[in-house]
Each structure stands twice: as C-alpha cells, then as structure tokens.
Image: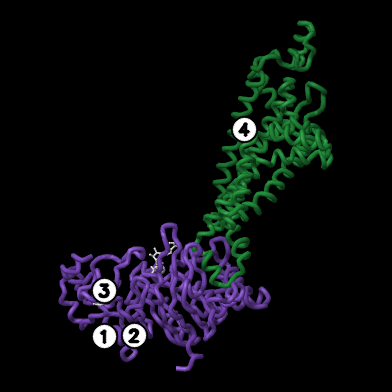
C-alpha cells in the first residue's frame, strides 16, 4: 500500500478531558488508517469516545474541556495536528468534511438551504454568488433531492429529517473532499430513511473515491456499508478487521457480545444476548483489560495486565483469552461468570 | 395572520377606549382643576371661576364632558391648550418630533453599545472583558434615571462645563438626556444579547458551520448573532414602552420639550385637553410598540413567518 493512498491516518491519538475534579483520557491511544475509496466503521456503545475521536481529527473539540494530548493526525500524509488554525480552517469542508448525527439541528434555522450551501463554497473558492448557487443546485441534484432550485429557497424546518441529512451530505461533498467523517449519520432517522442515506453515502464514496470514517453504535449499519471495522471500547480500539472477516469471525468478547445482541431477521428476541453491565466511567476504569468486568471469559491475567492490540493476518485483537464465537451464544443471556461479577 | 392582526387591532382599540375613560376621570378627580390654580390665578373670585368653568363646559357631569370630547376627537378636533391657547395639533408636531429625536437617539446609542459588548462578553465569557461589561450592566440597571442625570449634570455641566445642563434642541443638549434615557435599556440589552449568544453558541449548527470551514467571525456574527438577536429584537417593542415612561422623567429633568415634558407640565397645570390627548397618545404609542415587536419577531424568525 503506497502512502499516498492513505487519505487519513490517526496514530496513537489521545484526547483528554480537563475537568475540575481531575483529567480523564476519553480517547486512549487510538490508531487507524482510511484509504481512498474505503469506508472504515468505528463502532462502539454510546459514550465510548467515538465522537470525540472524530472531533479530534477535524480539530473541533469542545475546548474546554477536551484537548488532544498525544498522537498524530495525518491527512494525505501531512500532519494536521499542529497546523495553525487558519490553515486548519481552510482544510475543513474542503479536504475533510464532517456530517453530524442531528440533521434537525445541524442547519442554521434562520438561513435558507441555498445560503448555507453557497457560504460553504465561498468560504473556500473565489466564485460569484451565482456560480456558487449553480454549484449548490447541482450538488442537491446529485444527492437526489427533488426540484433542487426550489429547495435552495427553503428554510431547514421546511424539509424532512431525511432531506436535511441529504442537504448536510451535499454540503459536505460540494467541494469534493478526500475524507468524509460521518458521525452516526442515520441514528436520528427512521429505519427506511436510514437505508437510503447509507446507500447515498456508499454511492458518493464509490463515485468520488472518498475515504469515509463512519461512526456508529449500530452494527447493522456497519454491515451495509463498511469495508473495514474498528470496534471501540472505553476509548480504545479492541478489534479491527475487514468487515466480512469481522462478521464471520468476531474474536473479541465485546464484538461477539455486540453481534449477539443484534436481533436477527428471524427474530428470536427472547434469547437475545445482552452485554451485562455498563460502559465504565472514564474516571473509574478497571485496572487492566477495560472490558473485564463485563467479560464472560475474564481470567486473572485480564485483571492484572493491560492487553495490547495484536495483529494476526490483518485482524487486530486486544484480548488475553479469546474464545470461538459460538461459545458466547451458549452463555445464558445477561449472565456472567460469578467470579468475575464478584471481583467487580 | 390576517385574523391575528384583526384581533390585535381590536384589542388595541379596546385598551385605548378603557384608558381614555380612566384618564378622563382621573384628571378630573385630582384636586384643583383649571379654575383652581392650574390656569386661572388662585386669587380669582368665585364668579370668575364659575364663568370660566361654564365656558369650558366643566360644570357639566363628567360623562357628558367625556362624550363631548369624543365627539370632537371624532371630527378631528384635538382642541387647544387651556394655558396658552395653542392648538394641540401644533403642540403635537413640535413636541412629538423632539421626543422622537430623543427616543431614537437613545435607542441607537443603546444598541450600538449593547450589542457589540454583549457579543464580546459572550465570546470572551468569564474573562475580565466579560466581567467589566456585566459590572457595567449591573450599574446601568441599578442607578435610577434621575440620579444618573444629576451625576452627569454635576460633572459635565457644572464641573467641566462641557455640556449644557438642559434645554433644546442642539446636539450638545441632546447628549445627556439621550445617555440617561439609554442607560437601563443598554444594560438590559447587553445582558440579553450575552445570554442569548451563549445559548446559541451551544447549538449543534455552530459546530456544523465550523466543520464547513467558515471563518470564526462569520460563524459568530452572521449565524450565532443572527439567531441570538431574535429575542433582543422582540424586546425592542417593550423597550420603546419603557422609554415612554422614562421620557417623562428625563425630559422633565433636562427640560427637553418633548411629549413627556409637555404631559407632566399639563397634568401639573390641569391643562385637561393637553393632558388627556398626550397621555392617550403615549398609551397608543406603547401599544403600537408592542404590536411592532410581534411583527419584528416574526420577520426575524422564519419558523414563525411561515407558521
Ligand atoms: N463536552 C464534554 N464535556 C464533558 N464530557 C464529555 C464532553 N463530551 C463528551 N464527554 C464524555 O466523553 C466520553 C466520550 O464521549 P463521546 O465521544 O461523545 O462518545 P460517543 O460518541 O462514543 O457516544 C463520554 O463519557 C462523554 O460523557
Ligand atoms: S482480555 Fe480478558 S477480560 Fe478482556 S476481553 Fe479478553 S478475555 Fe475478556
Ligand atoms: Mg457520539
């Protein structure tokens, strides 16, 4: 793989919250690469640090309290972690774009769709208002918004949630960026609309050879669009593999738990597995393996030694005691080894 | 929208009608009266007074006087001052203009000061800039108008001799009354701008705008401020209403011949036609201000415009 194909690379990223009652690391040394034309899904339960990872990359962390304290972010091979803010600004929306979870509130309610797309263009390109307007209509057409010239005159509240998310995607793509970060782009939408939005992202990605970092807590979404999957837990990546490999052969107990808790189409909901316990508070993390209190396979070592991320045949895993996937399905729903529960 | 406007207008007329009755009775139940020292000399004889009252119809029952007055108003006859015989139409032209000049200057001063400071205080939240601005706001709201007026007159007129202490209508004479009239509104507007800015700085769209690569000033001024101004604009109507109240005090202190000055003077002299007309006019103005506030709010906020 040549370096130039890597559109986005994150190396050993650490993001810290500087709080009155102490500092906590919410992103704990994360590394990943996204190639041109590839979708990397970042998956994990709510609160595990996915959004803060994305905001660290595009440098829009809420500061205070959050700040990147370690690591590198390479955009097409260039480290952007330390470039001056005005340079970073010229990259945002042009070389790297982001789509957010809440299409309902991510548009300014007092400006028209047209104004909001054209200002994204004129912030980066010296074009006339009319040219920008034409570009805006074109991109709306491309994301399959009916009668785009009309929609340019609409205010956000006049559009449905799905349409607004299409507008957000259009706005993110209008300057043809290399990298698109999509943070839970479908979470706030109806299921039928979700599929359409994912199709759209996939189609745009193929057409433009976009590198997409897709953030979601929903594995069903991942299976639809991702080429590779990185599973995140408590600020760490615990497993990463090509999507087909990960779904066929999940190795981390957390990944296995997530997969077992997806209702299948056949719908045996009663015996659905639920991962016991909750995501740990970043201020009170377990001593070694962060998943140990919730893990059905935790052994002594898991409580004493932090497992490293180890690659075997391109499949990365952070676990001392991986078990075959089928084993988990034999574990009774919601139950854990009592010795583990006791040591919590 | 049409039915809403119709309702608002009907409601306004009703309030005007009720106020006119209250004002009419209140004026006449105050001790004295035009013949009792207000217009005529207190030394005038009983006969002279009775003849005077009869000539003006003041000997009739109050409700009769009221309906006669309404009849005159309906014909467009505003009457004349009992004190100097000036037609009220003429008083209206000069005094309303003076009041408008003063009021608009005050409003302009307060917005020019309050909005930039409110934005700055919000963006530099919890820094010394913020604390200074908010300290100023607390002063501006805490100091009574007449007290501020006295302080200004003491320093700028008596001590430094830079500004005339009262009178009309040159720009130097306008400065102090406009500042005093603007003080409280400036403070309120500044605090409102700041808190509204802080609220909208937390909106999701702010991060989305930054993600588009907009320059920070454009995010703050074009977007956050635009949203934050909606409640501030809707406050303008109320502020015009307060201005009317304060204008009575400020115009009187600075002897600025506006509507407020004229009203206070006419009430003290029991100049009924002038007092009646101008108090109704001020009420009408307050009502219109509130009505404009509603419309302004709708114009600033597309979500309401369509709904
Ligand atoms: N502005 C903030 N202030 C304090 N804590 C925050 C802030 N943003 C996020 N956090 C905390 O950081 C952790 C990770 O948050 P986030 O990245 O949003 O998770 P995810 O996107 O995976 O749901 C959570 O525990 C969250 O409570
Ligand atoms: S390291 Fe141990 S506790 Fe952690 S996931 Fe693996 S088996 Fe479970
Ligand atoms: Mg999130």
Quadrant location of the N terminus of chain A in the rendered image: bottom left
- Dividing the image into four quarters, tell me where ligand 1 lies: bottom left
Secondary structure state at the residue bearing disc 1: loop
Q: Are marks 2 and 3 in contact (CB under 8 Å)?
A: no
Secondary structure state at the residue bearing disc 3: helix
Q: Residues within 10 Å of mark 2 (few under 14, many from 20)?
A: many
Query: What is the letter of the green chain?
Result: B
Q: Is residue A214 above or below residue B220?
A: below
Q: Nearer the viewer, residue A270 or A319?
A: A319
The alpha-carbon separation of the residues under discs 3 and 1 comes to 27 Å
Q: Residues within 10 Å of mark 3 (few under 14, many from 20)?
A: few
For the point 23% across and 67% down, the residue is A276
The tag on residue B16 is: 4
The alpha-carbon separation of the residues under discs 4 and 1 comes to 80 Å
Pointer 3 or 1: first along the chain = 1
Camera-nearest label, 4 or 1: 1
Please name the residue that numbered disc 1 is placed on: A249
Query: What is the letter of the purple chain?
Result: A
Please name the residue that numbered disc 3 is placed on: A304
Q: Does the beta carbon at disc 1 come under 8 Å from ligand 2?
A: no
Secondary structure state at the residue bearing disc 4: helix
Q: Chain of mark 4?
A: B
Q: What is the quadrant of residue A128 in the picture? A: bottom right
Q: Are marks 3 and 1 in contact (CB under 8 Å)?
A: no
The single residue placed furthest to the front in the displayed view is A304
């Amino acid at each position: 793989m040549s370096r130039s194909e890597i559109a986005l690379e994150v190396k050993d990223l650490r993001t810290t919250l500087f709080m009155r009652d102490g500092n906590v690391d919410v992103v704990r040394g994360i590394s990943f690469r996204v190639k041109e034309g590839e979708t990397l899904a970042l998956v994990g339960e709510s609160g595990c640090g996915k959004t803060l990872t994305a905001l660290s990359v595009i440098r829009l962390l809420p500061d205070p309290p959050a700040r990147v304290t370690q690591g590198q972010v390479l955009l097409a091979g260039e480290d952007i972690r330390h470039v001056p803010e005005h340079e970073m600004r010229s990259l945002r929306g042009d070389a790297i774009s982001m789509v957010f979870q809440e299409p309902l509130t991510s548009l300014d309610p007092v400006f028209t769709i047209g104004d909001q797309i054209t200002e994204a263009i004129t912030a980066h390109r010296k074009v006339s208002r009319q040219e920008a307007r034409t570009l805006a209509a074109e991109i709306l057409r491309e994301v399959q918004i009916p009668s785009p010239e009309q929609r340019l005159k609409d205010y956000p509240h006049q559009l449905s949630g799905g349409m607004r998310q299409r507008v957000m995607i259009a706005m993110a793509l209008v300057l043809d960026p290399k990298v698109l970060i999509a943070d839970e782009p479908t979470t706030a939408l109806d299921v039928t609309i979700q599929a359409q939005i994912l199709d759209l992202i996939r189609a745009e990605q193929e057409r433009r050879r976009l590198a997409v970092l897709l953030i979601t807590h929903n594995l069903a979404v991942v299976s639809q669009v991702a080429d590779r999957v990185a599973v995140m837990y408590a600020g760490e990546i615990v497993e990463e593999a090509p999507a087909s490999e990960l779904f066929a052969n999940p190795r981390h107990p957390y990944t296995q738990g997530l997969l077992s808790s997806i209702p299948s189409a056949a719908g045996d909901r009663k015996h659905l597995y639920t991962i016991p316990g909750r995501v740990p508070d970043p201020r009170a993390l377990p001593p070694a393996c962060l998943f140990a209190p919730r893990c059905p396979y935790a052994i002594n070592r898991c409580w004493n030694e932090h497992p490293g991320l180890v690659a075997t045949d391109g499949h990365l895993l952070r676990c001392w005691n991986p078990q075959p996937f089928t084993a988990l399905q034999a574990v009774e729903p919601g139950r854990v080894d009592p010795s583990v529960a006791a040591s919590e | 929208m049409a039915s809403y406007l119709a309702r608002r207008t009907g409601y306004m007329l009703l309030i005007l009608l009720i106020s006119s009755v209250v004002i009419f009775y209140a004026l006449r139940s105050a001790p004295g009266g035009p013949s009792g020292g207000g217009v005529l000399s207190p030394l005038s004889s009983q006969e002279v007074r009775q003849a005077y009252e009869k000539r003006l119809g003041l000997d009739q029952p109050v409700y009769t006087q009221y309906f006669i007055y309404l009849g005159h108003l309906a014909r467009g006859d505003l009457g004349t001052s009992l004190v100097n015989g000036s037609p009220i139409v003429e008083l209206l032209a000069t005094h309303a203009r003076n009041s408008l000049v003063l009021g608009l200057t005050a409003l302009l001063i307060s917005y020019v000061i309050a909005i930039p400071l409110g934005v700055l205080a919000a963006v530099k939240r919890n820094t010394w800039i913020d604390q200074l601005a908010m300290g100023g706001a607390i002063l501006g709201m805490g100091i009574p108008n007449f007290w501020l007026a006295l302080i200004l007159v003491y320093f700028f007129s008596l001590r430094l001799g830079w500004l005339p202490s009262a009178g009309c209508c040159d720009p130097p004479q306008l400065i102090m009354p406009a500042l005093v009239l603007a003080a409280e509104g400036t403070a309120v507007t500044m605090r409102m701008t700041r808190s509204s800015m802080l609220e909208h700085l937390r909106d999701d769209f702010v991060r989305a705008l930054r993600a588009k690569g907009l320059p920070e000033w454009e995010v703050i001024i074009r977007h956050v401020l635009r949203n934050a101004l909606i409640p501030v604009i809707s406050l303008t109507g109320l502020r015009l209403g307060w201005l009317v109240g304060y204008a009575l005090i400020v115009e009187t202190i600075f002897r600025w011949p506006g509507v407020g000055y004229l009203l206070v003077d006419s009430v003290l002299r029991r100049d009924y036609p002038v007092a009646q007309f101008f108090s109704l006019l001020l009420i009408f103005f307050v009502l219109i201000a509130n009505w404009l506030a509603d419309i302004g709010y709708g114009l600033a906020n597309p979500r309401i415009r369509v709904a």
